[in-house]
Each structure stands twice: as structure tokens, then as C-alpha cells.
């Protein structure tokens, strides 16, 4: 009700004065409340205006920060681009290696030696007041045995004395310093039997040290201790390291011959494992055995070692991807059977897994029986392979044709993968596939256990930290171990005297047993430098 209507009602007597006063009081109170509300809203607007001003200042400050950060980001991007370019150059220099490798040792003792060389000269011997190797005359005076060496085929009275040379030899199981007196006839000099270059240690000491370090798995320090304890040979670590380097260099040509012989082998067992530098890869032929340390496990390395285009033999291996699509191959049955046995042990209540493992094992035993049966002709062996392949197909058929998908990381999924692997290997290659090649070829084995056994020493060395830290060391180990193992195959066993006699025969004959074998080769050998290039 407005004020004009109240006034007329009051004059006409419709409402009383008291009522009119109450209405006026009520309206006055309402006006006061509205005024208070307006004041509150005005205050709120003032506060919001202040907040907006503060936010405007903050936004302006953040804008300046963003501009500064943008400039910093541009600078960092430029530095990042420069680093990427340097990284590309480094990778290009490494000839495709995924990580940078140092060519020299980076152990604590090696760093201490480098620091010592930079800061001061070697300590001078307090007694002799000189450094380096001892004088030749002093060594000759300490010799306990003397021998005269004449040119081959020349009488002693027709020769004249040339010089004397001291050399440590292992005689009757004890280290003996021998003074060799070299005689000459014209330009022909007497040659010491069992010497390795101009070193002062005989070949038997080189071989014994190499066997202790690489075959037995001792460190160089412990190998020196063993030689000192049993043979009374005082040999320092630096001397032992030098002897190993000299032996590896002396046997480089023999290793080249081994590579060529391997490439012409009828059967090659191969396997690999990780190493401190890339991988270690073993290859076992009928007459040679090679271990490549520090090489990559890839198709290029396999091609460099075996020359696959011209390789005439069968490769026995596991089912790794690197060995697939080979013209002649035999996959290891031990790997396949272990997978079947594992499923039977994981799920002992599942009869299908146990039945599959038992039948697969019996199938392999029957294949081994057919291989050992000397009365079977080549045609009979082919028929036996067809029957074995038919049995394997019937064993795997149900699960192989099952389109049902299985969840990964389950026994059923592993079982289906095993079945698919067996069927793939059965259809791979030519003729008998890659599972029954050993039945038709008497030289081939059904498992790759020989190669796996040879890698146990490398795996132990890797676990105990006795691996190489540079490619120089890996190359040295590759040469020495391969020649020693191949000598063991040639001689039937690894014995120090037998190896020394064979090496001395090389010198007398002018040709090693490996060189005699490689003369039958019809291709140009590529040798060590293709697989293990000289660092630096």
C-alpha cells in the first residue's frame, strides 16, 4: 500500500492513527534494512574491486616471468641441440655401437697408474739406482743351467758364437733360468725351441698362465701366486699381463685359420650369453672351437663368422630369432622338453600337460633310437622322419588348431606357445624341418648341450666380475681361449706338455695343424679383424 492511499484511508476513517503509525514504522524499518543491504553490497563491490586490482598486478608479474622463462627455454633448446649433435658424432665414431666403450682399462688400479705416470717418474731401485729391466749379464750370472743353440743342420765346429740370452723355462715342474748361448753360421742363427718372440719366458709359461686365467678362471694376481707356489716362478702382474698380450699377438694368425675352418665345418653348435661388453658367442665345429668375447648378437656378426651364403653345414642352436630362416638347422630338443616339463610341474593335476610332456619325451627318444640304428638306410631314415613328424602333428593338432585366445602369463598360454613353436619348427627349413635333422644326418646332435656347457665358464666369470672392461682385453681373451680349446679338440685333451710339444712342432715344421687344415679351403678367409676389429 502506497503513502497516498494511507493518507486517504486515514482521512476517511477507514484506519486508525495507531495503525497508520505502525505501518509507517514498519516501512521505516524496511527502508533501514534496505539501506544496510545496499551498504554491504557497496562494501563487497569495493573488496572485489581491490581483489581485481591485485589479480591484475599478479597477472602482469606472471607475464614478465613467462617472457623471461621463454628466453631461458630458447637458450636451453640451443644447448640441447648442440648436445644432440655431439652425441650423433660420438655414435658415428663408434661404428654403430649402442654405447660408448673405452679402449683402455678404467679400474681403480689403472687410474692410479695413469696418475702416477703424470705426476712423477717410476721409483728408482734403491740398490741399483736405475729403472727398467735388469741387465742381461746379471740374469746370465743367476742362470742355473746353460745350453748351446746351433743353426739347424750345421755342425758345431762350423759355427761361431753370437750372443747369449736368458730365458725362464719350466723344467721338471720347476721354474729354471736357462742361459742359451746362440751360435751362428753366416746369416743363420740358432733358434731356441719353445720361445715366443723376444720374451724371457718360455712358451710353456705362457700357456700355463693362459690356462690358469682363462680356463681355470683365476685372476692374474692369483695365477701368479699359483705359479710362484708350485713352480717357484716370481712373476709380477704387469709381467703376466705382458705375457698374455704377447701370446695373443703370437696366435693371431692361428685364430684367422680357425675362423676359416669353422666356416667350412659340416656341423656347428652355437650359443651365446650376455657379457660385460655386448655378448660372448661360442661356436663348436668338428675340429675347432671358438669363443668370441665382446661381439654383438646380430645377423651381421653371424654372417661375418660363418659366411652364411657359402656355409655348407648344419647349425645346431636354440630357437632364438637370430637363428631363424637358415637353410640347414637343428633346433635344440632340450629347450623344448624343458618347457613341457615346466608346465607339468607347475600344474601337476592337469593330465593334459603331463600326457603331452610324456609323449613328447617318448617321441624324442624314438628319434634318438632311429638315429642310432646303423641298419637304417638313408631312405629308411627319411621314412622314419615322416612317421615322427606325423606323430608330432597328431600330438599338437588339437591345441594348434584351437582358435580360442588365452590370457598371457598363464600356463595355458605358455602351452599354446610351445605347441605353435613345435609346429613352426616342423615346417621350417627343408625336408625334415628343424626338429629331425639329427635323424637323417649322423653328424648332428639333437640338443645344443655342448655349446651351453662351454658358456658356463663365461657365465661364472660374468657373475664374479672377472670379465673384460675393454675391447683389447676381449680380443686377447678371444684369441687365446679359442686356440687353446681348438688345440684340445685336435689333441683330444688339454695337457700342458701335449700343447707345448704341438706348438714347438709348428715352429719346426713351419706350419701349424690349423694352417694345414685351412689349406683345403676354397674361399679367402676374413679372420679376426672382421668380427673383432682392432680397437683404436
Image (cartoon, rainbow, N blue to C red):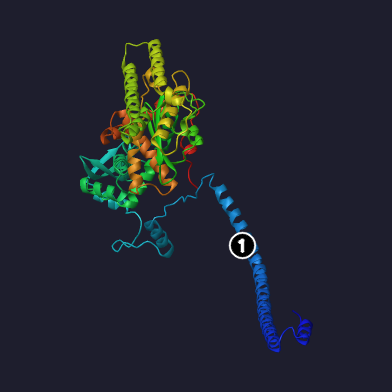
The N terminus - image quarter: bottom right
Counting from the top left corner in percent of width and height, residue 240 is at 33, 48
Disc count in the image?
A: 1
Q: Which of 91 and 432 is in front in this view?
A: 432
Q: Which of 194 and 294 is in front in this view?
A: 294
Vertical arrangement, residue 67 with respect to residue 524, above or below: below
Counting from the top left corner in percent of width and height, residue 264 is at 44, 25
Residue furthest to the front in view is 13
Q: What residue is shown with label 1?
A: 76
Counting from the top left corner in percent of width and height, residue 452 is at 35, 34
Counting from the top left corner in percent of width and height, residue 351 is at 32, 28
Viewer can see residue 506: no
- Quarter of the image where one finds residue 44: bottom right
- Quarter of the image where one finds residue 70: bottom right
Vertical arrangement, residue 83 with respect to residue 322, above or below: below
476 relative to 209 in the view: left or right: right
Q: Nearer the viewer, residue 162 or 536?
A: 536
Q: What residue is drawn where x is 35% and y is 26%?
A: 356
Q: What residue is drawn where x is 29% and y is 51%?
A: 221
**Element at label 1:** helix
Label 1: how many residues lie within 10 Å, few (<14), some (14-19) or many (20+)? few
Q: What residue is drawn where x is 24% and y is 47%?
A: 226
Viewer can see residue 90: yes
Amino acid at each position: 500500500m502506497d503513502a497516498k492511499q494511507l493518507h486517504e484511508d486515514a482521512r476517511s476513517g477507514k484506519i486508525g492513527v495507531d495503525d497508520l503509525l505502525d505501518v509507517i514504522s514498519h516501512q521505516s524499518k524496511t527502508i533501514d534494512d534496505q539501506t544496510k543491504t545496499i551498504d554491504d553490497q557497496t562494501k563487497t563491490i569495493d573488496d572485489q574491486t581491490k581483489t581485481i586490482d591485485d589479480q591484475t598486478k599478479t597477472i602482469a608479474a606472471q607475464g614478465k616471468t613467462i617472457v623471461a622463462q621463454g628466453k631461458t627455454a630458447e637458450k636451453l633448446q640451443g644447448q640441447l641441440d648442440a648436445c644432440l649433435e655431439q652425441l650423433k658424432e660420438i655414435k658415428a665414431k663408434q661404428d654403430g655401437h649402442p654405447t660408448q666403450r673405452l679402449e683402455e682399462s678404467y679400474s681403480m688400479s689403472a687410474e692410479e697408474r695413469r696418475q702416477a705416470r703424470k705426476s712423477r717418474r717410476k721409483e728408482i731401485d734403491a740398490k741399483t739406482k736405475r729403472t727398467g729391466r735388469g741387465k742381461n749379464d746379471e740374469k746370465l750370472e743367476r742362470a742355473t743351467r746353460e745350453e748351446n743353440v746351433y743353426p739347424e743342420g750345421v755342425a758345431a765346429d762350423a759355427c761361431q758364437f753370437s750372443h747369449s740370452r736368458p730365458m725362464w723355462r719350466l723344467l721338471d715342474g720347476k721354474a729354471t733360468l736357462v742361459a742359451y748361448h746362440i751360435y751362428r753360421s753366416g746369416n743363420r742363427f740358432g733358434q731356441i725351441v719353445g720361445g715366443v718372440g723376444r720374451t724371457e719366458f718360455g712358451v710353456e709359461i705362457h700357456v700355463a698362465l693362459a690356462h690358469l686365467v682363462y680356463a681355470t678362471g683365476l685372476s692374474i694376481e692369483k695365477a701368479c701366486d699359483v705359479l710362484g707356489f708350485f713352480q717357484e716362478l716370481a712373476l709380477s702382474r704387469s709381467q703376466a699381463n705382458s705375457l698374455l698380450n704377447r701370446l695373443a699377438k703370437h696366435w693371431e694368425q692361428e685364430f684367422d685359420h680357425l675362423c676359416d675352418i669353422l666356416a667350412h665345418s659340416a656341423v656347428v653348435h652355437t650359443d651365446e650369453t650376455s657379457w660385460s661388453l655386448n655378448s660372448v658367442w661360442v661356436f663348436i665345429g668338428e675340429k675347432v672351437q671358438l669363443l668370441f668375447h665382446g661381439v654383438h648378437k646380430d645377423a651381421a656378426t653371424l654372417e661375418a663368422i660363418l659366411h652364411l651364403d657359402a656355409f655348407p653345414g648344419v647349425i645346431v642352436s636354440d630357437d632364438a630369432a637370430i637363428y631363424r630362416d637358415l637353410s640347414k638347422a637343428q633346433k635344440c630338443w632340450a629347450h623344448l622338453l624343458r618347457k613341457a616339463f615346466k608346465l607339468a610341474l607347475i600344474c601337476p593335476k592337469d593330465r593334459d600337460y603331463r600326457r603331452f610332456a610324456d609323449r613328447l619325451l617318448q617321441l624324442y627318444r624314438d628319434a634318438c633310437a632311429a638315429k642310432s640304428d646303423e641298419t637304417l638306410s638313408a631312405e629308411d631314415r627319411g621314412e622314419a622322419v615322416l612317421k615322427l613328424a606325423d606323430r608330432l602333428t597328431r600330438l599338437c593338432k588339437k591345441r594348434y588348431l584351437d582358435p580360442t585366445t588365452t590370457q598371457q602369463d598363464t600356463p595355458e598360454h605358455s602351452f599354446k606357445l610351445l605347441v605353435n613353436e613345435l609346429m613352426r619348427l616342423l615346417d621350417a627349413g627343408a625336408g625334415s624341418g628343424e626338429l629331425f635333422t639329427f635323424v637323417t644326418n649322423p653328424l648332428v646332435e639333437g640338443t645344443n648341450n655342448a655349446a651351453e656347457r662351454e658358456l658356463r665358464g663365461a657365465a661364472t666369470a660374468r657373475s664374479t666380475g672377472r670379465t673384460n672392461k675393454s675391447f683389447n682385453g676381449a680380443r686377447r681373451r678371444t684369441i687365446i681361449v679359442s686356440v687353446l680349446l681348438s688345440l684340445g679338440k685336435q689333441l683330444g685333451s688339454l695337457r700342458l706338455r701335449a700343447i707345448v710339444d704341438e706348438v714347438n712342432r709348428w715352429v719346426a715344421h713351419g706350419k701349424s695343424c690349423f694352417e694345414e687344415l685351412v689349406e683345403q679351403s676354397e674361399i679367402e678367409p676374413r679372420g679376426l679383424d672382421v668380427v673383432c676389429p682392432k680397437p683404436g
